[in-house]
Image: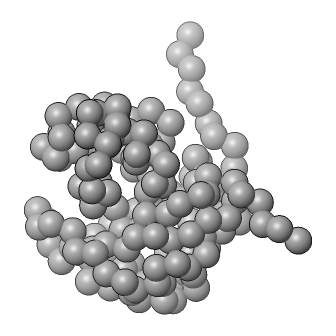
C-alpha cells in the first residue's frame, strides 16, 4: 500500500549548535534523547517543550523567496530537522516519527528577531501558515540519519483564533 504523500516524507537535514549565537552545525546523523533532545544541541535540556524544532523544506523555500533570497541556507532558520514532502501538523498534540524518534508537537516555531538579522523581512515571511516550523518534545529517543522516513502519526485540526 503506498504511503500518503501528505503524511510521509524524508529527513533531509540535521543541525545543532552547542551554545547560543553560534552558527548551526550540520551533521549526517545524531542521537536524540527524552532528557536532552538532539545530542550536542544546547536547547534540549533547557527547554523541554522545545527540544527539537522541525522545518519543512517547502515552507522554508516559500518564506525565503518571499523575503527575496530563495537560496538562503535552511540553517539560517536555526531548526534541528529539515524535512521534505510531508505536511507537518499545525496544532499542539500532533505526533510524528522521524527515524526511530517519536516527537510531540508543542507549538509552532514563532520567528524571532534573529530571522531579520539573517535576512531583512524573513521574520514576517516565516510567520504565516506555520512556515517557521514546529517545536517538539521528545516522547521516545533514538537515532536519526539523513534519508530517514518522517511520518505524521497524529495531526489534530489547526485551531485558528478569530477576533470578533
Closest to the observer: 112 or 98? 98
From the image, which quarter does the C terminus lie in? top right
Q: Is residue 110 above or below residue 68?
A: below
> In terms of image quadrants, where is residue 35?
bottom left
Q: Is residue 134 above or below residue 141?
A: above
Residue displayed at 42% across by 39% down: 62
Closest to the observer: 63 or 128? 63
Residue 29 visible, this angle: yes
Is residue 99 found left or right of 41 in the rendered image? right
Q: Residue furthest right?
A: 1
Q: Position of residue 7 (x, y in %)?
A: 69, 59
Residue 50 visible, this angle: no
Q: Position of residue 93 (x, y in %)?
A: 62, 57
> In terms of image quadrants, where is residue 81?
bottom left
Residue displayed at 27% across by 56% down: 73
Q: Is residue 38 above or below residue 116?
A: below
Q: Position of residue 66 (x, y in %)?
A: 35, 31
Q: How many marks?
A: 0
Is residue 21 found left or right of 105 in the rendered image? left
Q: Position of residue 121 (x, y in %)?
A: 23, 31
Residue displayed at 61% across by 75% down: 149
From the image, which quarter does the N terminus lie in? bottom right
> In terms of image quadrants, where is residue 13?
bottom left
Amino acid at each position: 500500500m503506498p504511503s500518503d504523500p501528505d503524511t510521509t516524507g524524508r529527513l533531509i537535514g540535521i543541525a545543532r549548535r552547542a551554545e547560543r549565537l553560534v552558527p548551526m552545525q550540520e551533521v549526517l546523523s545524531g542521537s536524540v534523547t527524552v532528557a536532552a533532545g538532539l545530542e550536542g544541541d544546547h536547547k534540549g535540556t533547557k527547554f523541554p517543550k522545545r527540544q527539537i524544532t522541525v522545518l519543512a523544506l517547502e515552507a522554508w523555500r516559500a518564506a525565503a523567496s518571499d523575503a527575496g533570497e530563495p537560496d538562503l541556507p535552511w540553517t539560517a532558520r536555526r531548526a534541528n530537522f529539515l524535512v521534505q514532502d510531508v505536511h507537518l501538523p499545525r496544532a499542539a498534540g500532533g505526533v510524528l516519527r522521524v527515524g526511530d524518534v517519536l516527537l510531540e508537537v508543542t507549538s509552532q516555531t514563532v520567528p524571532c528577531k534573529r530571522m531579520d538579522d539573517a535576512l531583512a523581512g524573513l521574520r514576517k515571511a516565516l510567520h504565516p501558515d506555520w512556515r517557521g516550523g514546529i517545536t517538539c518534545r521528545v516522547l521516545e529517543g533514538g537515532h536519526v540519519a539523513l534519508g530517514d522516513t518522517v511520518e505524521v502519526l497524529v495531526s489534530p485540526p489547526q485551531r485558528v483564533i478569530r477576533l470578533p
